[in-house]
Amino acid sequence: MIFIDGTIQPLFYGNRIRDGAQMANYEARIRTRFGELVIRFENREELAQKLKEAQDLAKDIEAQLAEFIAVEAAKPIVGFEDLYAILSDGSIKLLRFPETKTDVIRLLLFFSPKPLTTDEIRFMTGIDNPLANMKANDFIELPGGTYTISPEGRTIVTSKIIPQLRGLSR
């Protein structure tokens, strides 16, 4: 079988023999970060076994070739490029700063694609004690000691902080 844009189709019908060996009746093509992986199989059981082997193989390949795999650099959300940048290590660099430390942290968490630890917040904002500035209900502590911003905090960022940074309100 061939996987084509979410559909599966038979590779060919009947038994085929090449170089004295029987060829598989089905084929699956899987796009990975390191290229395309082709799996040939006869039935569901064989596919399940080969997929398990392929997962292990993919992990080994990624571990061995991590430095060679091209990863597209993350980019800021369109329309907010004037407010922040994403560095090569994935950290966020704010390009404009609100007046209060609490608003700086709100803005950082608003743009962060993942929850951040206090060490990450300290590193990205330069604020020595982030927790002292995160008393508002706008901050949500998650398991693992990471923080994100609440929907109310997001509203403050979009309705107050960003317009102030762009000189649209005072």
Image (cartoon, rainbow, N blue to C red):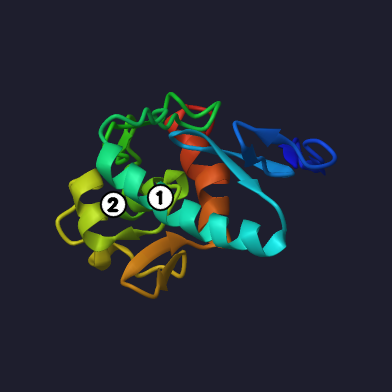
Q: Nearer the viewer, residue 76 or 168?
A: 76
Q: Can I make out residue 170 in this image?
A: no
- Residue extending farthest bottom: 143
Q: Residue at x 67, y 40 (%)?
A: 23
| Residue 54 appears left or right of 31 | left
When the figure is inspected, residue 87 is found, relative to residue 15, above or below; the finding is above
What is the x, y in percent for residue 65? 29, 37
Amino acid type, callout 1:
Leu
| Residue 17 appears left or right of 79 | right
Secondary structure, mark 2, is helix
Comes first in the chain, label 2 or label 1: 1
Disc 2: which residue = 101
Determine the image quadrant of residue 88. Answer: top left
What is the x, y in percent for residue 157? 50, 47
Q: Residue at x 40, y 58 (%)?
A: 115
| Residue 64 appears left or right of 29 | left
When the figure is inspected, residue 95 is found, relative to residue 146, above or below; the finding is above
Determine the image quadrant of residue 135. Answer: bottom left
Disc 1: which residue = 57
Q: Name the image quarter holding the N terminus.
A: top right
Q: Residue at x 45, y 25 (%)?
A: 81
Amino acid type, callout 2:
Lys
